[in-house]
């Protein structure tokens, strides 16, 4: 898994998190940790570029939801330094953060998984980066 960041200017500043590789049980914590670092460094609007992610496991799906929790100001790190803790998706609680975390260009197999588990309705998904950047207000 390779993770890189860029800062873009839409209507407001947006951090783009480019992921390359599978998001699975061996990489999901990397996604969470890097998103937490970006948030700690001041990022408040995040566009996750999935164009180079061919596969997302259930652990990968949890990591995407954890990123939403991070950008709502909640810590997902466990107090004992173990695995991150996760809470159930709560549409009302997560709405504000969902406006701050959006997805870009999921590959068809990834988009199919997002649809199967209901996360396609949860995330705002874009196929064009300029449109995605302008959607942050």
Image: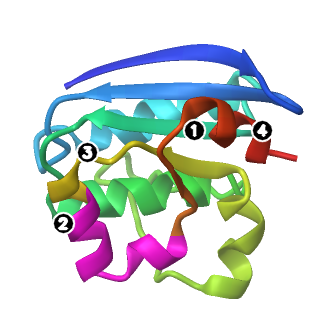
Asked if marks 3 and 4 touch (Cβ < 8 Å), the reply is no
Few, some or many residues within 10 Å of mark 2 (<14, 14–19, 20+):
some
Answer with left or right where residue 79 lies relative to residue 28.
right
Point out the frontmost of discs 2 and 4.
4
For disc 1, the marked residue is: 47
For disc 2, the marked residue is: 58
| Residue at disc 1, secondary structure | strand
For disc 4, the marked residue is: 134
Which of pointers 1 and 4 lies earlier in the amino acid sequence?
1
Q: Is residue 112 magenta?
A: yes
Asked if marks 2 and 4 touch (Cβ < 8 Å), the reply is no
Residue at horizontal 49 percent and vertical 78 percent from the top: 121
Residue at horizontal 67 percent and vertical 39 percent from the top: 131
Can residue 79 be seen? no
Q: Which mark is residue 113?
A: none
Residue range of the region highlighted in magenta in the rendering: 111-122
Q: Nearer the viewer, residue 65 or 129?
A: 129
| Residue at disc 4, secondary structure | helix
């Amino acid at each position: 898994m390779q993770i890189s960041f860029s800062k873009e200017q839409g209507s407001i500043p947006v951090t783009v998190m480019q992921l390359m590789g599978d998001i699975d049980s061996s990489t999901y914590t990397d996604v969470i940790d890097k998103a937490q670092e970006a948030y700690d460094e001041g990022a408040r609007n995040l566009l996750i570029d999935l164009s180079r992610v061919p596969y997302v496991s259930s652990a990968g799906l949890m990591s995407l939801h954890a990123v939403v929790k991070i950008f709502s100001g909640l810590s997902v790190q466990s107090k004992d330094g173990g695995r991150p803790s996760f809470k159930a998706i709560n549409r009302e609680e997560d709405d504000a953060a969902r406006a701050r975390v959006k997805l870009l260009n999921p590959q068809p197999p990834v988009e199919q998984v997002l649809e199967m588990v209901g996360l396609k309705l949860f995330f705002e998904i874009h196929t064009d980066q300029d449109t995605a950047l302008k959607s942050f207000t």
